[in-house]
């Protein structure tokens, strides 16, 4: 008798708890079912729920919540179900959701991540759907080119705008004049200046040049030399090209010969973070607009007793006088299993028109008024004696800027970057020669590209 | 002789002190970082605390601008329910496989054990699809259910019940108890020590789980502490000071559980070790 009652009690408890906690999940099932409706559901008055996958830093902000409120007022029939994921695990979650057939209507990604999704066949071409929401992909984003086979898969949000940040105190202490506001230094000049302003004998070491353990700090100079040709014409790895060899050798000269940058072993051992530049012990760093939005304008989080300056991106001597940029585009995309492409692009259009500016980035969408962006940024940097004219020129307002690829994005981009970074330290620690490490990268990534093509 | 004893004692103390330092250094770094500004985190030379510039704002941000209380509650809820149900099922399973025995029980148990060799990552996608099918995605039950049945726990309880004195249960049978009642009244109370060990180990293991909540939960308000910790990461890097402030707050319940049950925990480890 007791056994029967016990079993009954356990069964009842499980049933009760499962039923009680299944509520949210059931809703998602309903929303899945409703999403089987036609793509013009919102237009016909039916409510559509869009699942929007994005990284935490863009989705957990007060500004994003305010944007969603405005969006709901403007489009009451399009509900947004935000799925916010920490960036470190974003790709894993995205892959599992898309591979399982889970409904996702819009997803964020940087250049590497979106091309990875295109290569995996996760995304749909958006040319037609864009037309339906009155967006001309060929004109409304400047010189943005089709992604694959003449089709657009990405709805661009923003493009990185790179420049040279420098610490005026370090320059003053070394009695070295500041970089020119308009004329870029060549990389050779940067190396010389970095050596002059380095001081390793003081109470705290001051390195003339700061770098991050990211690919472009090693191969970016080469990308400027060969117009971002990370792949050969047959789609294989081109990292062993002479331009990239020269680029890596330049960094070796600065780091190991001129001793003007932290040795890579020390950099990795110290777990040096990209924001470490803002502790004041470095003279120069090449950084994009995110340095301003994350640190330079946020003195409450990054207190400093020195002024920062900004100057154009350094260039190879062959390109002297030219304003250059490493281009990397963050974008939104519509997965193939979305049944609401049109509504997803309505959300994408509003995201770049209404929200992107509040993240501190300049939207590529040309129909957005941008003057306020430059004015607010200049105002936030006025204590550093940075002018509106400088901000406008360097933060995306120069139409003559020459963009080259910031990093490889086409074949096996994730493997390309991670393999490069895994192996490259062997050159900078003197364990291997530059040709050896670059050839090793080529062999490994070519194999990954071939594997990808088979699939 | 006395001198040499003192020397030995001093040397031993220094060694233990150094070992203790190795273990406590990450905790000290965590506390130190939680009171710094982001650009001070990896400064050289290392400063333990900038006394004139302590950044309490990290804690204010965690407590007022994040869903930390919800994350904490979610973690506690998931861990408590999971541990209680896991202990119940492990005890039942262990009793069945170790004490009762039945036809093909060893063969069935062998198949159970084989599932331990499947890498967890391989099961993520099928689990995700299953939970979506039954509508459990984005609910805490997607975290609890896979934790309830743990083969290692069943294995440990089986080992305990293998050497369980049959006379005690037979005496209960003689007095009219059935299988279930004799389990509840006789076997379970005597399994308190291994269950406590298992409970504490499970508590720490489930508390730290990261992939399951990452994959199965979509809504921020459903997150558990480990995922909350990762949300201070941007695409360019981590906000270590904020992460460490959250970690300092999140460690309080774990420390509380450990301190409250420290004596029993150590006793049970020693005791179950002797039995094993």
Image (spheres, rainbow, N blue to C red):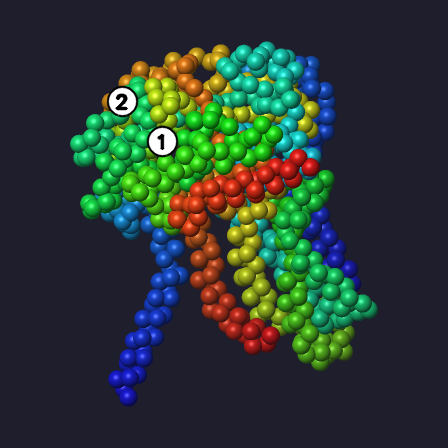
| B177 horizontally vs A299: left or right | right
- Label 1 secondary element: strand
Q: Nearer the viewer, residue A297 or A23?
A: A297
Q: Nearer the viewer, residue A304 or A7?
A: A304
Picture disc at residue A286: 1
- Label 2 secondary element: loop
Contact between labelled residues 2 and 1, with CB atoms less than 8 Å apart: no
Q: Is residue B163 above or below residue A30?
A: below
Alpha-carbon span between mark 1 and mark 2 = 15 Å
Q: On the rendered image, what quadrant is the N terminus of chain B found in?
A: bottom left
Residue at 64% over, 53% down? B119
Residue A76, image x, y percentages: 59, 18
Instruction: Please name the residue that numbered disc 2 is placed on.
Output: A180
Mark 2 belongs to chain: A
Query: Total label count?
Result: 2
Mark 1 and mark 2 lie on one chain; the one further toward the N terminus is 2
Residue A426, image x, y percentages: 44, 48
Q: Is residue A303 above or below residue B36?
A: above
Mark 1 belongs to chain: A
Residue A350, image x, y percentages: 53, 18
């Amino acid at each position: 008798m007791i056994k029967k009652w016990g079993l009954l009690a356990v069964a009842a408890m499980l049933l009760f708890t499962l039923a009680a906690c299944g509520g949210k999940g059931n809703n998602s099932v309903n929303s899945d079912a409703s999403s089987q409706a036609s793509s013009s559901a919102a237009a016909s008055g039916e409510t559509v729920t869009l699942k929007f996958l994005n990284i935490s830093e863009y989705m957990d902000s007060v500004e994003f919540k305010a944007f969603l409120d405005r969006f709901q007022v403007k489009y009451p029939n399009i509900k947004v179900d935000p799925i916010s994921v920490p960036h470190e695990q974003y790709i894993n979650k995205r892959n599992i959701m898309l591979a399982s057939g889970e409904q996702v209507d819009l997803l964020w990604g940087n250049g590497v991540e979106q091309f990875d999704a295109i290569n995996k066949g996760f995304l749909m071409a958006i040319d037609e759907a864009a037309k339906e929401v009155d967006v001309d992909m060929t004109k409304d984003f400047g010189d943005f080119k089709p992604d694959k086979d003449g089709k657009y898969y990405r709805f661009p949000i923003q493009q990185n705008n790179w420049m040279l940040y420098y610490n005026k105190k370090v320059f003053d202490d070394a009695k070295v004049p500041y970089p020119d506001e308009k004329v870029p230094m060549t990389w050779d000049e940067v190396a010389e200046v970095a050596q002059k302003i380095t001081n390793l004998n003081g109470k705290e070491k001051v390195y003339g040049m700061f770098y991050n353990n990211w690919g472009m700090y090693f191969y970016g100079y080469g990308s400027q030399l060969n117009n971002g040709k990370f792949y050969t014409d047959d789609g294989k790895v081109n990292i062993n090209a002479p331009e990239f060899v020269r680029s890596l050798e330049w960094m070796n000269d600065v780091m190991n010969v001129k001793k003007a940058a932290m040795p890579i072993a020390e950099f990795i051992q110290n777990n040096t973070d990209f924001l470490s530049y803002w502790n004041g012990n470095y003279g120069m760093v090449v950084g994009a607009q995110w340095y301003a939005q994350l640190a330079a304008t946020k003195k409450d989080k990054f207190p400093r007793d020195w002024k920062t300056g900004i100057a154009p991106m350094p260039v190879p001597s062959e390109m002297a006088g030219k304003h250059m940029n490493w281009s990397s585009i963050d974008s939104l995309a519509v997965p193939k299993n979305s049944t609401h492409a049109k509504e997803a692009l309505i959300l994408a259009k509003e995201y770049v028109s209404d929200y992107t500016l509040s993240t501190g980035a300049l939207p590529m969408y040309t129909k957005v008024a941008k003057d306020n962006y430059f004015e607010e940024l200049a105002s936030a940097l006025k204590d550093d004696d940075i002018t509106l004219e400088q901000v406008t020129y360097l933060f995306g307002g120069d139409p003559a800027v020459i963009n080259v690829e910031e990093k490889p994005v086409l074949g096996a981009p994730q493997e390309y970057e991670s393999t490069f970074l895994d192996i490259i330290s062997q050159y900078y620690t003197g364990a291997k020669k530059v040709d050896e490490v670059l050839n090793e990268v080529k062999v490994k990534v070519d194999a990954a590209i071939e594997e990808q093509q088979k699939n | 002789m006395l001198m040499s004893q003192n020397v030995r004692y001093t040397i031993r103390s220094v060694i233990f002190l150094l070992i203790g330092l190795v273990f406590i250094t990450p905790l000290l770094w965590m506390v130190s970082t939680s009171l710094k500004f982001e650009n001070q985190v990896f400064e050289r030379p290392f400063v333990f605390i900038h006394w004139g510039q302590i950044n309490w704002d990290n804690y204010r941000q965690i407590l007022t601008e994040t869903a930390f209380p919800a994350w904490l509650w979610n973690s506690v809820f998931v861990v408590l329910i999971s541990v209680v149900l896991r202990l119940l099922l492990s005890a039942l399973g262990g009793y069945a496989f170790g004490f009762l025995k039945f036809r093909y029980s060893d063969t069935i148990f062998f198949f159970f054990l084989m599932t331990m060799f499947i890498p967890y990552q391989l099961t993520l996608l099928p689990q995700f699809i299953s939970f979506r099918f039954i509508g459990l995605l984005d609910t805490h039950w997607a975290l609890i259910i896979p934790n309830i049945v743990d083969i290692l726990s069943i294995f440990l309880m089986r080992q305990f019940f293998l050497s369980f004195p049959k006379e005690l249960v037979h005496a209960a049978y003689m007095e009219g108890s059935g299988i279930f009642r004799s389990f509840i009244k006789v076997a379970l109370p005597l399994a308190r020590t291994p269950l406590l060990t298992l409970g504490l180990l499970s508590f720490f293991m489930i508390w730290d789980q990261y992939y399951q909540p990452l994959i199965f939960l979509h809504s921020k308000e459903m997150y558990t502490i480990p995922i909350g910790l990762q949300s201070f990461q941007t695409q360019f890097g981590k906000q270590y000071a904020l992460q460490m402030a959250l970690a300092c707050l999140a460690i309080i319940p774990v420390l509380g559980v450990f301190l409250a049950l420290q004596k029993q925990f150590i006793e049970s480890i020693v005791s179950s070790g002797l039995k094993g």
